[in-house]
Amino acid sequence: MIRFTAILTLIFTLSVPFMVFAEEAAPAGPSLGLTISNVWMMVATFLVFIMHLGFASLEAGLTRSKNTVNILFKNTLIPAIGLLTYAWFGFNLMYPGTFNGILGFAGFGLPFPTVGGALDLSYNEGYTYWTDFLFQGMFAATAATIVSGAVAERIKLNSFLVFSAVFVGLVYPILGSWKWGGGWLDSMGFYDFAGSTLVHSVGGWGALIGAIMLGARKGKYVDGKIKPIPGHSMPLATIGVFLLWLGWFGFNGGSVLSADPALVSLTLVTTCIAAAAGIIGAMLTTWTISKKPDLSMVLNGCLAGLVGITAGADQMGLGSSFWIGLIAGGLVVVSVMMIDKMKVDDPVGAVPVHLVCGIWGTLAVGIFGAMAGMKQFGIQLLGVGVYGITTALATLIIFSMVKATMGLRVSEEEEVEGLDLGEHGLEAYPDLALQPGAKSSAL
Amino acid sequence: MIRFTAILTLIFTLSVPFMVFAEEAAPAGPSLGLTISNVWMMVATFLVFIMHLGFASLEAGLTRSKNTVNILFKNTLIPAIGLLTYAWFGFNLMYPGTFNGILGFAGFGLPFPTVGGALDLSYNEGYTYWTDFLFQGMFAATAATIVSGAVAERIKLNSFLVFSAVFVGLVYPILGSWKWGGGWLDSMGFYDFAGSTLVHSVGGWGALIGAIMLGARKGKYVDGKIKPIPGHSMPLATIGVFLLWLGWFGFNGGSVLSADPALVSLTLVTTCIAAAAGIIGAMLTTWTISKKPDLSMVLNGCLAGLVGITAGADQMGLGSSFWIGLIAGGLVVVSVMMIDKMKVDDPVGAVPVHLVCGIWGTLAVGIFGAMAGMKQFGIQLLGVGVYGITTALATLIIFSMVKATMGLRVSEEEEVEGLDLGEHGLEAYPDLALQPGAKSSAL
Amino acid sequence: MIRFTAILTLIFTLSVPFMVFAEEAAPAGPSLGLTISNVWMMVATFLVFIMHLGFASLEAGLTRSKNTVNILFKNTLIPAIGLLTYAWFGFNLMYPGTFNGILGFAGFGLPFPTVGGALDLSYNEGYTYWTDFLFQGMFAATAATIVSGAVAERIKLNSFLVFSAVFVGLVYPILGSWKWGGGWLDSMGFYDFAGSTLVHSVGGWGALIGAIMLGARKGKYVDGKIKPIPGHSMPLATIGVFLLWLGWFGFNGGSVLSADPALVSLTLVTTCIAAAAGIIGAMLTTWTISKKPDLSMVLNGCLAGLVGITAGADQMGLGSSFWIGLIAGGLVVVSVMMIDKMKVDDPVGAVPVHLVCGIWGTLAVGIFGAMAGMKQFGIQLLGVGVYGITTALATLIIFSMVKATMGLRVSEEEEVEGLDLGEHGLEAYPDLALQPGAKSSAL
Amino acid sequence: MKMVSAIIKHFKLDEVRDALNKIGVQGMTAIDVKGFGRQKGHMEVYRGVEYEVKFLPKVKVEVAVSDYKLDEVLSSIQSSAKTGEIGDGKIFVYGLEDVVRIRTGEHGEDAL
Amino acid sequence: MKMVSAIIKHFKLDEVRDALNKIGVQGMTAIDVKGFGRQKGHMEVYRGVEYEVKFLPKVKVEVAVSDYKLDEVLSSIQSSAKTGEIGDGKIFVYGLEDVVRIRTGEHGEDAL
Amino acid sequence: MKMVSAIIKHFKLDEVRDALNKIGVQGMTAIDVKGFGRQKGHMEVYRGVEYEVKFLPKVKVEVAVSDYKLDEVLSSIQSSAKTGEIGDGKIFVYGLEDVVRIRTGEHGEDAL
Ligand SMILES: Nc1ncnc2c1ncn2[C@@H]1O[C@H](COP(=O)(O)OP(=O)(O)O)[C@@H](O)[C@H]1O
Ligand SMILES: Nc1ncnc2c1ncn2[C@@H]1O[C@H](COP(=O)(O)OP(=O)(O)O)[C@@H](O)[C@H]1O
Ligand SMILES: Nc1ncnc2c1ncn2[C@@H]1O[C@H](COP(=O)(O)OP(=O)(O)O)[C@@H](O)[C@H]1O
């Protein structure tokens, strides 16, 4: 650990020169249009930020209490790692300016544009350089969080942290540059408004590969039968999903990249209709299949609708949004069950929600809405395929290297005992243990 | 269930033509004023949205853990049902344009106004058509949520869902059109800024009728004595109330329907002063009566102050806001106890908070602030009466029809066992059960 | 209690004349610039508001379940007391206009500036009078909340409420006027952007004095050894920290006091980088020292980074922000352990986070960023010293007076039994008790 | 002396306590337990997979009594805890060799 | 009749229940307990201070059986609960003087 | 062998455990229970209605000991758990017919 600290310190010391100081950031009469849009984009940033709490709550809720501290720890570290790596090099890998369309890099740190010593406000009509960085940085970290849920309850803490740093620092930005950075898939006409593919499928592929490589949790598949392992707190899971829906207002609404009233408000409406339809779709499907309506599925259905609409949230009408969401809600229930039958153990349903519905949403851009058409559908399919193959490959390589060097999975004993004790020596709910003084006990 | 799915699918298929597609929503130079106000109204929409999580947390916290999944399920479904019915017909029932003042309908779906193929931005100075719909839609769903708390722990799930759909889809919009839609009560000069009556009393009457028709929870009133049934999680309840207060910034602040700096900020101040005074009022009352200060009452007091100020939040000064809130805080404590003595079982205090303080707030417009006066007081009283009678009647009819066809109350066995197992087959906190693997247990 | 009510009623009745009514607050064509900035400042206000829920969750999570109701009660009362005292006199103590630099008072109530009968919109370019009050009022209440955590699990409820009222109503505003009110320390060039000293150190000194005067919780230090008393819910604590981070966007971002795009967005970036670095700093330190990475420390590390950057969030570049946060994260871990060794019992780490890192952040303004320099460092040191001595003294006096008249600490029996039963007669999680009907039990 | 240990349904706890109080039993200890018996567990569904939760929540009530009181206590518990349906529970009787009241140090019947 | 009370590890509960079912035992009661024994507790760290949590989570399984079944039950539990490592637990056997089935009022062996 | 089962106050658990350790008892099992006795419950208020919570939280500590150790164990528990106030609790002593150590299969005194 000490060595790790030393290396990290060294690295950051070296990189400081690259982090240009902003000592004289006094602005000179910003335009009102920029000011408004920038306020909106900052609000969107806050909303995307709160998604990290949403993921933390959802994942903690859908897993067992003996691993809760570990989940919370990971989900607290992810935005920290994400923001720092993104500041250090990720942002400039993702938006390298004009480049060869495959790989570009604009240098370490955040060399902000200046004019007359102050921040250059002509950087963009919709936001300042800093807002741009922070909004994109919050986005970046969500991709790693998606993986976190699928590998929960058995992955080693430091292995996961190393994976996350590489995933969010290198894989996500490079893949992102192909489309949002203006790279080759963008030139081909691939469309992904707010990231059904670039964020959700990318995270989803990571989740799938991670879950397969780790293997199932002990006790999940016994003698060929599926043994459900219920999460420990439905209120936490529900809080998580509501916060994620809230965050999606910023995720999709902010992806307009300005406060354009018509476009942003349309985006919010399509987003909400899809979320609502996802809830209904999942409810009808689970009620039909299981006879009892499953809350955890309905929560996943809400997210499914949100992921589904994300690729085309600015391209859809109300009807299309409804159908995209409804189908996503049905899809998620069916794919949770299918993935389980394939004995891939994904405790929180990250693969069905983010991968399956991410693909569905990306293809839906070719089926519904303003861009619908065979040609567009073909391009969307190409994008889905390209991102699938490259992400799966990249994840495979990283996980294999981590496995070879540090190992991936905790010991069987630690898994039974819980990662909270094994990795952290701390319980999530210590009062439930028999501790003198903890209980409220009358004298 | 399968039949239900089929019907629903059919209905939506038929309605799709009415959902006009928004394929070319590219805006043409929106005014800055509209852009600012629209940003504000979108933020207000997010805040009202988060009230649904507030209600979910509060209701779950103030009821027993054996019914928690059921509560969370209902509160997840309500915004979904609310948004979809509101999109399909509710919005156009509530805002039919020029109409006879009693009942009007502008058609199915959301036929948005266009100009030159794009969204008509002259729709309103303060927001776009889409923002208008979404803000109002989020409001609509809150009325149904209020009922949910009062009927908790004993109502059948599908009966509640059907009730909610009718209540939020038909009752709320039609009643709303009388005032906010420009109907006959509006013409008469009835004032209800953000809905002490239109949202809270309407929800509160539904809650009262529902609670009476269902009867008390088993074990609540035994041999003529009141047996308290404490909720299961005070932290959840507290989180709920803070989120509701947060949401109220949008509920009241957004009801200005523009970003007017003076009016919006005044509204936020009156709202907060009333909330703070409600807390103090409830604390003093409960401390005086019960000798011990009851957290659940203080939380209700906060909401009481908020509901109380809602009708006149833009009409009050600081002193008036303080007194309205303080009195509301006292009222809620006294009426919780009175309603309990009348053996109406309202687990979360929905009737005292939303009905009693909704009435108080509506009348307060005639007593305090800019509109105070005998004539206004009379009109406010009329409005209270009209909404009371019609909502009570409507709710009575719906609940009676539901009761006759599907039944209202779960079986006694299911109630004892808990609705989580009975309706959902899922526990809220499965780890508290003795499940091998769940507990963190050293080998 | 009844007497207390009577006095309070009397006091408020007397003060009502001072609360000028805002009956005709119709604005006359506000400028767009004001409207935008005002929207931003209102959003910032909401974010600071939600910090109260953040503190409530964090403190409840890091203490035992037998005292949870008490903590939630205190944290619900604090914003209520804070807002009302601030409206009544605090705001005018803190911003008395031109004054002698040490103590000034602009009168009771909120006599808002008018022009032509309406609110004077030329009050400020960035916000209206009402927004100013509400933003500052939300800030004020946070200082008292900081103390709440350090004295938790043993302080008498009414003693704490009285202390809070005086602390937030008198101490904070008077001290605040020295800098933010344009007083003598402001004239000297002391810099504290958003309150590393004015809010956090002030709260932190209160926390330290309170914790010392109360003494440690029973069972914390036994036979010279430290016996850890783990909090009861890590999820609650984590929710709290994420909400606090969210709130800090408004705390720091709002302290720009306008929507200036360059400055606000820079502030948000420095804030986030420091928070992220604080997490990493605390993780590395705790992992190195304790061999196991402690979640509660990492959560404190996040807050440490945030407190550390607060004094100079608008003055720093990225590199500086990173180092300030990283050092704060390390500092907090070390000082938690040191304070514990000194047998000062601070259950939630309020002193390390708010006092130690508040001092660190204030001094950092003289070390890093645009203002760095020996002279500035000297002035910063002076400010730290002045605020330290005066706050410590003021707190000592208040606590001593409260102790002499009402007593500070609950009885040993009540402490063992828990304050929830002792002060409130209510448990936080009643279902965990053996109550017939509470458990979900099959018939 | 005997120790009577009864496994009953949760919602019968108050009735059993009151019944025992009525016949002069002033002390008892209750424990949350999970029972497995003739009564079958309930089915739960989680993410599409059905499974049986085999252990049902019950309460165990332990009452130490003098020998002469045993029969009265047994029938008092039996009648107050009975619903007539499967899962009503069982009562176990153990011999008790000694009892000590911690506060006073008394032994035997005096300590009851 | 005997009451067999076994302190076992949580994750062995299902195996023990199945093993008992196999030899015809149809009823049992399980209780969450904390054990302290030769197996040392685990170290936890909280805010920089290490401490030992001495009581480890265990399950107690109580089974009432006829005398003739005792040995079979004991060896069934012993073999199904065994991992061979410290902390596997202990089985205690008490004499049971009577059993009552609450639903029917039956006594003794019939009530088992 | 005897099984000593003591109902004590939560905050005395550590003292009792240490006292038992001192006289050479190395194993014990603790269980969260709710007690009802001479000590009256506490009043709670919820939404304006007062009610008595009759069962108070206690801990049951179970210790299996050899016959010759019984008296020492009893007085050790009694003195370490005593505060002198009502509600200190009770100790119950049962006969223990056999003990099995699951890990090794040892029976009787050897298994203690
Ligand atoms: N042999 C046994 N040993 C220990 N506990 C038992 C035994 N049989 C039943 N029980 C307990 O008694 C409870 C009720 O038993 P069950 O057989 O379901 O009811 P009934 O006897 O009324 O048919 C069970 O849940 C279990 O806790
Ligand atoms: N003397 C005893 N009295 C009561 N319970 C005991 C006693 N000794 C052990 N136990 C229980 O048995 C469990 C296992 O005992 P332990 O000594 O750790 O294992 P082993 O006998 O396999 O070495 C303990 O956790 C405790 O609950
Ligand atoms: N007859 C009994 N049977 C079982 N448990 C009992 C009995 N009497 C007392 N207890 C247990 O002992 C605890 C302490 O008893 P109590 O009568 O309150 O104290 P004391 O004996 O010191 O006056 C009770 O809370 C209860 O758990």
Image (cartoon, coloured by chain):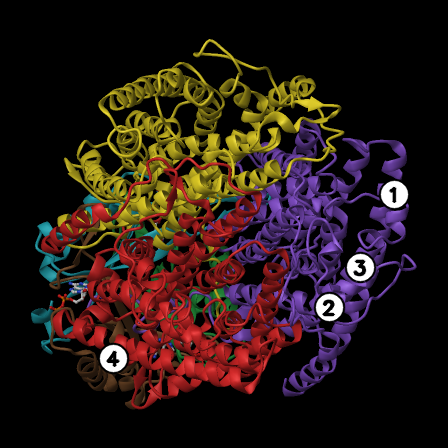
Chain colours: A red, B purple, C yellow, D green, E brown, F cyan
Q: Residues within 10 Å of mark 3 (few under 14, many from 20)?
A: many
> Helix, strand or loop at disc 1?
loop
Q: Earlier in the sequence, mark 1 or mark 3?
A: 3
Front-most of E54 and A127? Answer: A127
- Asked whether the residues under marks 1 and 3 belong to the same chain, the reply is yes
Tell which subunit mark 4 falls on.
A
Residue depth check, mark 2 versus mark 3: number of the one nearer the observer: 2
Residue C148, percent from left and from top: 40, 34
In this rendered view, identify the residue nearer to me: D11 or D45.
D45
Q: Amino acid at mark 4?
A: Met
Instruction: Indicate the amino acid at tag 3.
Output: Tyr
* Crowdedness near tag 2: few (<14), some (14–19) or many (≥20) residues, C-alpha within 10 Å: many
Query: Residue A213, labelled with which disc?
Result: 4
- Secondary structure at badge 4 equals helix
**With respect to residue A394, does B50 lie above or below?**
above
Q: Tell me how far mark 1 sits from mark 4, CA to CA.
A: 69 Å
Quote the CA–CA distance across marks 4 and 2: 48 Å
User: In the structure shown, which secondary structural element does the residue marked by tag 3 occupy?
Assistant: loop
Tell me the subunit letter for badge 1.
B
Q: Position of residue B121 (x, y in %)?
A: 71, 56
Disc 1: which residue: B189
Q: Position of residue B48 (x, y in %)?
A: 61, 53
Question: What's the mark number on residue B95?
Answer: 3
* Residue occupying the far top of the picture: C100
- Gap between marks 1 and 3, in whole Å? 18 Å
Q: Nearer the viewer, mark 3 or mark 4?
A: 3
